[in-house]
Amino acid sequence: MNGTASHFARWAVVATVFAVVAFVAFRPVSSVENVSAAQLGELAASGVRVIDVRTPAEFNVGHIPGAELVPVAEIASVAAGWDRAEPLVIYCATGQRSSSAVQFLSEQGFETVYHFNAGIVAWTGPLEQGTTTAAAPERTPATADTPVMYEFFTDW
Amino acid sequence: MVDRLRQEYEGRVTFELINADTDADAEALMQRFGVNAFPTFVFINSDGTVAGKLLGAVPEQRLREKLDALR
């Protein structure tokens, strides 16, 4: 009786180890790779989805041709319906917001995530403008006779 | 830092703080000045010409140099 129990326990351990090894070996592994502007261009040309996680205002001013707008605040809800096996390229302005988006997608099991970590400020290719038509910009400063310093910022 | 500079340069330079997420004029102004990243500082002379643009976390001294050079 004692020998049978011991034999059973031994097989239980072997089966458990096998199951763990199989899980580790065959689960989808998320791969994150930083890419340059040139690599991004090649990936986009080959049909890889490019996701811009900046704000709509930033996107409309200029974005990488073919990019889709998904502001970083919406990435969790929008990406929930995406195919996790489909490769993605993520970028923002300077790499800060895209870092959090890339981390989130990686944690969610997206298998291949390319990160244009230098951001659109490092993009030397052509830009595409959004479809929003802005009114003729002519904001009058509070004091017309003095020089003006504009600071453009976001809540992010 | 910007608040401090605004007080210091009051009467000499007008400070316009544009929140790209909430300001109704933001997009138009960004297109006008070619702003596509944040923060960006744009310096305009009193005759309307663009005196310069600084991007990112700019040291106070760089801002002061730009502000002092405005005419």
Image (cartoon, helix red, strand yellow):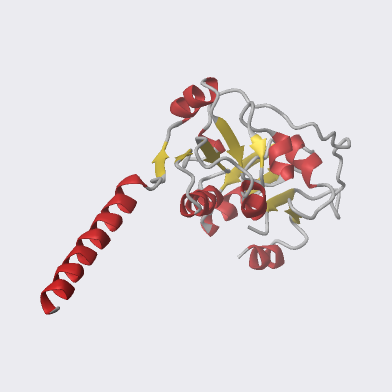
User: Most extreme residue toward the top, as rendered?
Assistant: A45
Q: Which residue is depicted at the point 57% across and 32% down?
A: A49
User: Most extreme residue toward the left, as rendered?
Assistant: A3
Question: In front here: A46 or A26?
Answer: A26
Q: Which residue is depicted at the point 80% across and 31% down?
A: A131
Q: Is residue A44 above or below residue B1?
A: above
Question: In front here: A100 or B64?
Answer: A100
Quarter where residue B14 is shown: bottom right
Q: Position of residue B52 (x, y in %)?
A: 63, 40
Q: Position of residue A156 (x, y in %)?
A: 63, 57
Quarter where residue B47 is shown: top right
Q: Which residue is depicted at the point 49% across and 50% down?
A: A99
Q: Position of residue A39 (x, y in %)?
A: 44, 27
| Residue A52 shows in this picture | yes
Q: Which residue is depicted at the point 50% across and 35% down?
A: A87
Location of the C terminus of chain B (image quadrant): top right
Q: Position of residue A67 (x, y in %)?
A: 63, 32
Q: Is residue B35 above or below residue B64?
A: above
Question: In front here: A93 or A76?
Answer: A76
Location of the N terminus of chain B (image quadrant): bottom right
Quarter where residue A76 is shown: bottom right
In this rendering, would A45 be left or right of A38? right
Question: In front here: B4 or A37?
Answer: A37
In this rendering, would A91 be left or right of B14? left
| Residue B44 shows in this picture | no
